[in-house]
Structures are given as C-alpha cells and as structure tokens.
Image (spheres, grey):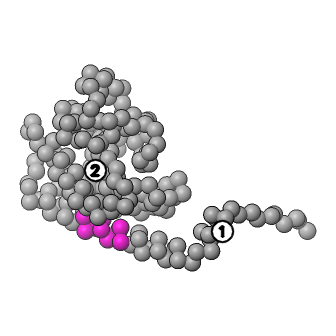
C-alpha cells in the first residue's frame, strides 16, 4: 500500500475551501459581467452606425466578439472585442475586459497594415489619451494592470516614442479601472470608442 500524501492547508486556504457561497457568487458576478458586455456591444455598434464612420475599411463586417475564459494565470476573465478586425497578422482590436481580482481594462491593439496606417494618428493625438499606458513588453496579450512593461503614453517624448515604435511588431495602449469602480465601466468603454474614432477621423 502506498503511503498517503499529507495534505496541508494555510488558514487562508481553509477559509476559501469551506466557503460554500464563493462559487455561486462567482457565477452570478460573471453572468452580470457577460450581460453588461452584450449590452455594451449593441450600444457600440449602434453608435458607430449612427455616426456612419468611413475611416476604417471593413468596419461593417466587424460584428464584435465576447469571449470567456477561466484560467488567465488562474483567473477568470470576460472580454468584448469591438471593433475586431483580424486578418492573419493584421489586427485592429479595441478590447474591453474584466479580469477577476485585477481590473476592468481597455486595450487598443494594432499590428500589420493597421499599425502602419493608423499608429501615427494615435501618437500625434496621444495628449487625448491621458491615463493610458503604452505596452513596452514583447507580448501583446498581457493583461495585468500592475505588471512591468508599461509607460505613460500621453507624456512620452515624440522622438523617443517614434524610435521605440519602429522596432515593434505591434502597437498597444491600455488603461485600467479599479474593480470597485465597476459602475464606470460601460461609460468609459463608450468614451474610449469615441476617442478612438475621433483620432482616426482627425486627418481623414
């Protein structure tokens, strides 16, 4: 007979696995977030349709996407991508995201032809993106608010910024919202959508 492995738990772990309310609460929370994302997607599409933007070819084919996951470094997440123009290595994604225990967040990701076409518009209008951070890490799919690899986008010097971006395969700027400020999430998401399209429209 094999020897039994001795289980050892911390006081904190004991509290967690004896809490019968945690998982029902998690399900309710995630359902509410998903419902808010679905509503937000419809409002975003309606706003874009009302304003009849002509600055982003292919936009009419971008229907948006809501994604769900349970294990981003062990944490559940819910994601809304709109616009979400994806063609191989060419990306134009505006992402609104809930990451359990970390933040609500908003991310603009450009690569390929979309980066070549639109990056300078955001660089030149970076003063409008106060509070946003430029991703300087090498992975565009990082989402934690407080990890290393961010620089204050609005206050970067243009020469430093242009020199850095010439070496990059992607352009990503992000801003984060404390989870306790959840009531501001949809307002900020709509505001960010408007800010992105205002920037695209400046020289077109």
- Say whether residue 28 is magenta: no
Image height of 139 relative to 36, above or below? above
Answer with left or right where residue 133 lies relative to residue 22.
left
Which residue is located at x 62 percent, y 69 percent? Answer: 15
Give the percent coordinates (x, y) of residue 93: 29, 48
In the rendered image, which quarter is residue 146 located in?
Answer: top left
Give the percent coordinates (x, y) of residue 183: 29, 64
Give the percent coordinates (x, y) of residue 162: 28, 25
Q: Secondary structure at mark 2?
A: strand
Residue 14 — which label? 1
Image height of 124 relative to 105, above or below? above
Give the percent coordinates (x, y) of residue 143: 42, 48
Image height of 88 relative to 71, above or below? above
Q: Earlier in the sequence, mark 1 or mark 2?
A: 1
Q: What are the residue bounds of the magenta stretch?
A: 32-40
Of badges 1 and 2, nearer the viewer stands 1
In the rendered image, which quarter is residue 168 located in?
Answer: top left
Residue 94 — which label? 2
């Amino acid at each position: 007979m094999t020897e039994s492995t001795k289980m050892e738990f911390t006081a904190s772990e004991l509290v967690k696995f004896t809490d019968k309310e945690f998982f029902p609460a998690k399900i309710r929370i995630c359902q509410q977030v998903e419902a808010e994302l679905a509503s937000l997607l419809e409002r975003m599409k309606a706003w874009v349709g009302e304003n009849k933007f002509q600055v982003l070819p292919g936009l009419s084919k971008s229907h948006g996407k809501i994604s769900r996951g349970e294990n981003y470094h062990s944490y559940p997440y819910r994601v809304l991508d709109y616009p979400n123009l994806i063609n191989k290595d060419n990306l134009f994604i505006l992402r609104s995201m809930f990451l359990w225990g970390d933040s609500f967040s908003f991310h603009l990701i450009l690569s390929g032809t979309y980066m070549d076409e639109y990056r300078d518009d955001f660089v030149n209008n970076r003063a409008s993106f106060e509070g946003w951070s430029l991703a300087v890490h090498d992975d565009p799919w990082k989402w934690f608010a407080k990890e290393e690899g961010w620089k204050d986008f609005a206050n970067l010097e243009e020469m430093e910024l242009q020199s850095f971006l010439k070496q990059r395969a992607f352009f990503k700027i992000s801003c984060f919202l404390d989870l306790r400020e959840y009531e501001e999430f949809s307002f900020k998401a709509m505001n960010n959508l408007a800010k992105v399209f205002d920037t695209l429209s400046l020289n077109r």
